[in-house]
Structures are given as C-alpha cells and as structure tokens.
Amino acid sequence: MHDQPKLQPLERSEFFSDHRASRPPVDGAVARGELHEDELFYTGFENGELATQFPFAVTREVVEHGRQRFNIYCTPCHGQLGDGLGTVVQRGFQRPPSYHIDRLRQAPVGHFYNVISNGKGRMYSFNDRIQPNDRWAIVSYIRALQLSRHVSVNDLPPAVVAELNAEAAQ
Amino acid sequence: MAQLFHTSANMIARLSLLAVVLGAGGGLTALLTVAKSPYNTQQNMPVDQPVPFSHKHHVKGLGIDCLHCHTSVEQGAIAGIPPTKTCMTCHSQIWTEAPMLEPVRESFRTNESLEWVRVHDLPDYVYFNHSIHVNKGIGCVTCHGRVDEMPLMMKANTLQMSWCMDCHWHPEANLRPRSEITNMTWAPPADPDERLALAQRLVEEYNVQSKVSCSVCHR
C-alpha cells in the first residue's frame, strides 16, 4: 500500500531507458492550447521585428506581479535595482549590464522578452521556468525600474511631493 | 469445607485485573510514542544526497527565493525538484572546478537525471496538493520548518495523518498573506486582537474552509 505500482511524478522508472517516470512530450507534438499562434505574445516579435508594444494593457497589478517575479528569478544576478550587482555576482558571476545604460533604455520591449525566453551570452534562457504572461509582467517592471531614475518632481503625485518636502525639511 | 481462597485473594484478583489494563495501556502508549518518535518518522534527520546541496547557503546566504527552483508549487500538486539546467544557470561560472559539483556537471553533459534522495514521501494512498495550500495562505515554513537554516534537507514534521488533521480542523491559526508564502521569518502580529483580525480577514478573503472528510486525502 505504501508504495503502489503506479508511478508518481519525478519517480524512477525501470521501464523507460532514461529512467524517468515523467515523460517529455514526443518531438514535434503540440498539446492542446499550445499552438502559440500569437506571434507577439509568444515570441516578442512583430512581423520579424522586435516588438515595441506589449501584447496586453499594462495595469498596476501587472507591474506589481512583475516585481514579484523579477525578485524571484532575476535579482540574484541583476540586483533589486537592476544595476547588475546581485548576490551571485558578488560571489564571482560575470556582471550583467545595468538596465539603466542608454542602450537598454532605448531597447524595445521585445528585446527584454527575447532575452528572458532565449538567454543571451552567459545568461541561460528562462523559458522553462517562466510562463509568457509572467515574462511580459517582468518586462513591464524593468521599464518601471528604468523610469524610476528619470522622473522629474513635477510628475509625482502631490502627496508624494509633500512627503519628500517634509523629509527634506528635517 | 474450608474456603479454597483466602479473603485477600479478592484484592489480588482486583490488582491483577488492574495490572492487565495498565500494562496494555502502557504498552499501547509506548507503541504510539515510538510511532510518533523521530526514530520512526525520520524527523529532523539530515539525509545524505549525491550533491551536498545546502538550502542554508542558497536561500539565506544568497537570498534566492524558493520559487526560483521549485517552480510548480503555485500551480501544481508537486513543488518540483529543479532540473540540472537550473543549477547550471549559476554553476556554469560559480565553483566550476569543485569536485562536489561534478555530478551536476556530468548530468548536464550526459543528460542523465541527477537522482536526489526523497526526504518527504507520503504513502501512495494519500493525495496531497501543494497549490491549494499555497494559494489559501499556508507558508512553506509551516510545513517544512526553517529550510533556510538546513545545510542538508530534513523533515521538520511527522507528516502523519494526525499532523495534517491538527491543521485541517483549525486552519485559521496558520494563515498568512499570500505575499509572504516563501518568507521564512514572517510572524503574525504580536497583538492578539490584530492577530485575530488578520486571521478572520484572510479566512474570508481566501475562502478557507475546514476540510476533514476522509475522501479529501484518501480518494
């Protein structure tokens, strides 16, 4: 009863030659709902060019979800500020470029989506760990990070300006 | 005819009856104690692994979130053990010469799975699902203990039926906001009134129920 003959996920199987009970899909198989026809959403490209727009409207929830996912998957290397000084980099991993350099500030959103999906240089791809909608959420948060260093005081809500003035007065 | 038994025999008979009852009770208690003891449940015993992977170094030392490696815990029944590629995203550059990481590199080269030794293993007749617990506000630390302080993985709880039931009767005491699920050091508000208010709010917001019928786990 404790160990029934049925196989459970991640268990060892003597039947298959690679000993994996969890089977990878056969090459070329397309699961239901996995046709990925939406080019923009799944590849970050539009008509062969890196996309310059998001495939869905970016709301506050999307950005906040993006922050959470960014902190899970990216901060070990890119750091919480996106400056490329995460804990793993401090232990000797190659330092990634800061998101705040001009080249990446000008880069279209499709570029970021593409780097997450396919990796770049020493950075491995995250396509097996992060679903497409989460990737886009992360991209929106990177945009927010980039913006955070270039906001003028006039763009802030009055309540925040008052808070800053109070702090400066002290 | 003289009496066969002296009157004191009454007392002896009663005492021996008592002794039988006590003995059986004591034996049963002893059995139950052994059944729940760490010796039987393998609780708090570090398990040797093919690679001495340290949650303490990776989680506490480097600040890596549980989900970075256990990616399916929010959507699936199983939390998932990371594939070798996950280790290699960092170890292609970190500790690349270390002999203790050779099994990881070999697995990456040959595409053979690393075989980790299971630490938590419910009997196959029990159904368990991570996603419902995580989405209803039960944190990893509640069931797995201070993983961020384990140099080698070990079981922090018995995983026996009574342990599951203790919580299933009164889940509200163990709830936390979803944003704190992987936080190892989150604590509920110290003030009893605030604590109660938070529990009540979460029960309502996540619609948490007390599920105790046998078919919940034996299906």
Image (cartoon, rainbow, N blue to C red):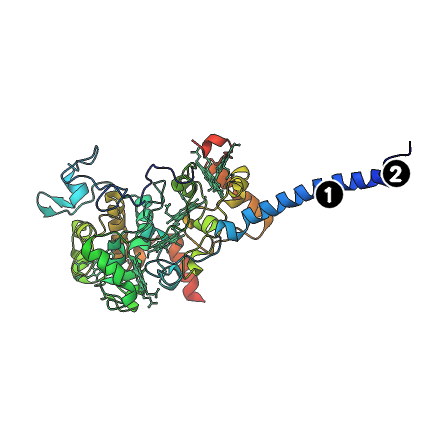
What amino acid is found at the position of numbered circle 1 in the picture?
Ala
Q: Is residue A98 toward the left or the right of residue A50 in the image?
A: right
Of all chains, the one bearing label 1 is B
Which callout, 1 or 2, points to the residue nearer the camera?
A: 2
Helix, strand or loop at disc 1? helix
Q: Which comes sooner in the sequence, label 1 or label 2?
A: 2
What amino acid is found at the position of numbered circle 2 in the picture?
Thr
Measured Cα–Cα span from mark 1 to mark 2: 19 Å
Q: Position of residue B77 (x, y in %)?
A: 36, 40
Q: Is residue B167 above or below residue B55?
A: above
Are the numbered discs 1 and 2 placed on the same chain, yes or no? yes
From this viewpoint, which residue is outermost toward the front? B1
Q: Which mark is residue B19?
A: 1
Q: Residue A80: name its quadrant.
A: bottom left
Q: Is residue B209 above or below residue B33?
A: above
Whether residue A86 is visible to the viewer of this picture, yes or no, is: no
